[in-house]
Image (cartoon, rainbow, N blue to C red):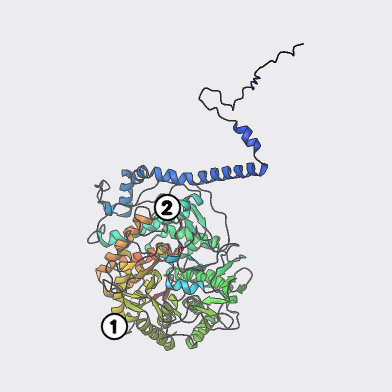
Amino acid sequence: MYPPARKDFVSLTVPEQDRGSYNNSKQWRRQSCWRKWKQLSRLQRSLILFLLVLLLVCAIATYPTLLEHWAGPSGEVSKKEWHKDDADTLLKNVLPGAPPGAGQQDSPPPDKQHAPILPEPPPVKKAINRRGPPSLQNYSRKKKENVSDSQVEEKLDPALGSRDQVEGEKPVISWRGAMIEAEQATEPQPSAREKERADGKEHLELARPVNTGNTENQEPGGTTGRLEAVREAFRHAWKGYKEFAWGHDELKPISKSYGEWFGLGLTLIDALDTMWILGLKEEFEEAKTWVATELSFDKNVDVNLFESTIRIIGGLLSTYHLTGDGMFLEKAKDLGSRLMPAFNTASKIPFSDVNIGKGTAHAPRWTSDSTVAEVTSIQLEFRELSRLTQDEHYQKVVNEVMRLVHKLEGKQDGLVPMFINTNSGQFTHLGVFTLGARADSYYEYLLKQWIQGGKKETELLEDYVQAVEGVKKNLLRKSSPRSLTFVGELSHGHFSPKMDHLVCFLPGTLALGAHNGLPKEHMELAKQLMETCYQMYAQMETGLSPEIVHFNMPPYEGQDVDVKPADRHNLLRPETVESLFYLYRFTQDKKYQNWGWEIFKNFNKYTRVSSGGFTSINNVRDPQYPNPRDKMESFFLGETLKYFYLLFSDDPNLISLDKYVFNTEAHPLPIWPSAA
């Protein structure tokens, strides 16, 4: 038999076509993403989802900044647009006597252009009524290179903090209305755009008067026109306060709301005597009605002894003397008696905080120290309260403070440290000397108490004269290249060329002393320092001074004044205008009026808010966007505008300096008769 025939064959298996296979068409087909996704572990999938969500959030967060950057050129154009009607109205109101149509000027050269006019923000709900000092606004972390010499000292200082500290925030210190971070001598510069977004505002609008050129003969209608311009500025500020912050402590003109510190109508009380001096009787009467019917100190609220004394008691006593209305004296007496528990300490150095409803007092939460300026700058008011009420207790407690400070160790050539302990009654943080924050008004009140009391208290005069010599020996230097005389700071033997704007009270105080018989050298020094304080304005791009400057020392070429980024804010402070007033009143040199007129116009140009009020600003070096802070301090009406008015007046009897002495909040109190 033959074997079966062998069958050769080829087995071919045709796989099922699949979307991920190669089909010989020379085109790759995409693999299934879903299949690959399912092949990943749960942990891998979760991690990928998390990263995608994170990228999405970052993209949303950075979108406004990118949009702003892309739209920059067109945005600049829109900001610079002027409305003719607004310009004419401002010119007519702020600068009376200007010709019709004066607003139709050719555009000034680029370096003289006005700051941008920004669209008005949408209405913002009023702030919640909160007791205590206003919170810090939009702090950003300060760069290491911006820390000045005195800041190093304060960073090591555990005593610095604030009654306004919120849990989780850095403590802060209030000084003359400025909120200063405890670990810094200067305030960080917040981003303008970040501030707007944080406050829920897209844009800010500042009102500007038309540029009127240089000072020489530019006053509209002469002295009368300048005085009317100050009245108009006050009415504009009052309009904003009345509409958006009536009865509250401070106006927030940008957001059209208010801020509370003590809840006692600080701005209204601070402005009472200003309205009387400016002749604004209608505004005065409506404010007087509020004081008579609404102002009550029977509140469970902590107030600062120093601030409430100089602003409220000083304002009420001054208004009483100007008007003769006993209601103001009764209100001052009520508050004065409620502040007396502050002096119930073993050392007789008063606590800084008082609850005026409960009748209790205490040191700040973070320290048992008080600042030297605070405890030695309440004397004018309490002494006058004793004289008017025939209750010697008010004067007794504040005189005791001066006696204690007079004999304390730790001074250097009459200069005092910045802090004093309420338990021990001794100076603390020895070796640091400044005429700026926390020490300034100690020197001012040495001289003014001596004048107030009829020049009889020689101990006060001796301390003042010794302190002036100490300033000349330890703190006085010349800048480069213009040889400007300035007052620096001393820290454990190390000199720092740092000068606060607050120090600009000194030219006026020196001039006042010379007027009252002190050496002529005091007046010469006053004139030199007055030039320096003016240059702190003139050398800035906006013509407004920063809060703090550092002077360049020889040899140096360039500007005399250097400003760190964190110090560029302007709080509408009065000290330079105050000293200009004293220098003009005693010398009759018109240049001081002209300097003041320049400064006044720049306040109008860069801080005026169209809806009413004026705002402090963050950057005096940026005329295109000075970055408004949305706050009008009460001292702008109580001091700054008052001193502008007195400076521009040629009437020596308008608050005669031979009959009145101004407290540190610009409230005039009478010089006591010699028989007193």
Q: Which residue is mark 1?
A: 520
Q: Quadrant of the N terminus?
A: top right
Furthest residue toward front: 1
Residue 669 rendering spot, x and y as whole percentages: 43, 74
Question: Which residue ends up furthest to the right in the rendered image?
Answer: 1
Q: CA distance from mark 2 to mark 1?
A: 44 Å
Residue drawn at point x = 58 percent, y = 83 percent: 424
Residue 601 appears anywhere in the view: yes
The amino acid type of the residue labelled 1 equals Lys
* Whether residue 571 is visible: no
Q: Quadrant of residue 466?
A: bottom left
Q: Residues within 10 Å of mark 1 (few under 14, many from 20)?
A: some
Residue 612 circle label: 2
Image quadrant assignment for residue 654: bottom left
* Residue under the image location 34 percent in, 55 percent down: 623
What amino acid type should be assigned to the residue bearing mark 2? Gly
Which quadrant does the C terminus fall into? bottom left
